[in-house]
């Protein structure tokens, strides 16, 4: 399986491409990367970070790849640094996804019912357009609200399902507990163990594991269950080991969950 991961490089803070590479590799994928921006750290919790959008470089990289005839089984997109980049990433599907390949989009917009720095309603509207060309989308509860205007998960999921065949709302805090909500010819839910606190990078760990799992032919239910197990074990470890969670989660010693699931 050959995967193209489109995401930023946050040099510090264990998210985006720096976690997508090891996680997708643990799923047995050959991973190529298209960096969308280069930051000294991610934007949540650090002050004074540097941010270099790579819009022009992304175009040049892809023009070179055209000459190589590269084609991918899976394209997985995450944090995008500008509205132009959203448009550009839409075009990657036609250019680089094999026929029958899978496009997984994580519409990274915000958390705790707030936009991440630099994003706004216009950005969310464009991200909705990217969701409409994806096979699977992985908004968290904040992003599902920012995309649809709905706080009710069933209503948000139904709205997202009008544009994408397999929306998943990750970490949805419903009245009767925490769930993964997903649409697969109808609404389904998988209950999640809940941990107090906010775990930076958890969404990126989940998205990379999920992209690796569905790309390897697992059903949506199997892929969600496996990715949730990997992330929940990483959360438990991080609660014990990481004093300052903005530096990211300790997931490395949980990668065996993925390597074991994808043994030949
Ligand atoms: O984990 C999501 C993410 C990815 N990339 C950057 C971010 C964030 C969340 O804060 O700032 C640069």
Image: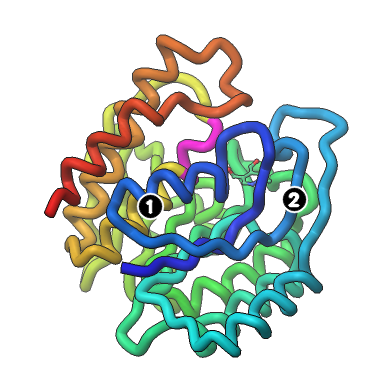
What are the residue bounds of the magenta stretch? Answer: 200-204
Label pair 2/1, CB-CB below 8 angstroms = no
Q: What residue is shown with label 1?
A: 24
Q: Position of residue 41 (x, y in %)?
A: 72, 36
Q: Which secondary structure type mostly characterizes the magenta part of the structure?
A: helix
Where 85 sits versus 157, above or below? below
Write down the quadrant of residue 6 in the picture: bottom right
Q: Position of residue 112 (x, y in %)?
A: 59, 36
**Left or right relative to 94: residue 110:** right
| Picture colour scheme | rainbow
Which quarter of the image is occupied by the C terminus? bottom left
**Left or right relative to 32: residue 80:** right
Q: Position of residue 77 (x, y in %)?
A: 53, 63
Nearest to the observer: residue 142 or residue 43: 43
Q: Give neighbour class at mark 2: few <14, some 14-19, many 20+ (Cα, 10 Å).
A: some
Nearest to the observer: residue 153 or residue 122: 122
Q: Give neighbour class at mark 1: few <14, some 14-19, many 20+ (Cα, 10 Å).
A: many
Write down the quadrant of residue 254 in the picture: top left
Query: Could you say which disc has been placed on residue 38 in the image?
Result: 2
Residue name at image x 23 percent, y 68 percent: 184
């Amino acid at each position: 399986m050959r995967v193209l991961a489109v995401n930023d490089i946050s040099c510090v803070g264990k998210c985006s491409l720096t976690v997508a590479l090891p996680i997708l590799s643990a799923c047995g994928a050959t991973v190529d990367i298209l960096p969308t921006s280069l930051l000294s750290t991610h934007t949540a919790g650090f002050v004074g970070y540097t941010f270099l959008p790579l819009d022009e470089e992304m175009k040049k990289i892809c023009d070179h790849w055209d000459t190589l005839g590269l084609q991918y089984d899976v394209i997985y997109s995450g944090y995008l640094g500008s509205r132009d980049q959203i448009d550009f990433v839409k075009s990657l599907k036609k250019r680089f996804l094999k026929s029958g390949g899978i496009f997984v989009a994580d519409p990274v917009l915000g958390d705790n019912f707030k936009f991440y720095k630099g994003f706004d309603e216009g950005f969310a509207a464009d991200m909705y357009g990217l969701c409409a060309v994806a096979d699977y989308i992985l908004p968290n509860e904040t992003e599902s609200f920012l995309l649809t205007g709905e706080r009710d998960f069933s209503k948000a999921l139904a709205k997202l399902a009008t544009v994408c065949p397999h929306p998943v709302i990750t970490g949805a805090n419903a009245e009767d507990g925490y769930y993964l909500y997903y649409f697969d010819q109808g609404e389904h839910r998988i209950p999640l163990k809940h941990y107090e606190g906010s775990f930076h990078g958890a969404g990126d760990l989940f998205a990379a594991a999920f992209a690796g799992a569905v790309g390897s032919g697992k059903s949506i239910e199997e892929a969600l269950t496996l990715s949730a197990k990997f992330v929940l074990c990483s959360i438990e470890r991080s609660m014990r080991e990481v004093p300052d969670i903005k530096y990211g989660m300790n997931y490395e010693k949980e990668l065996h969950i993925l390597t074991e699931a994808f043994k030949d």
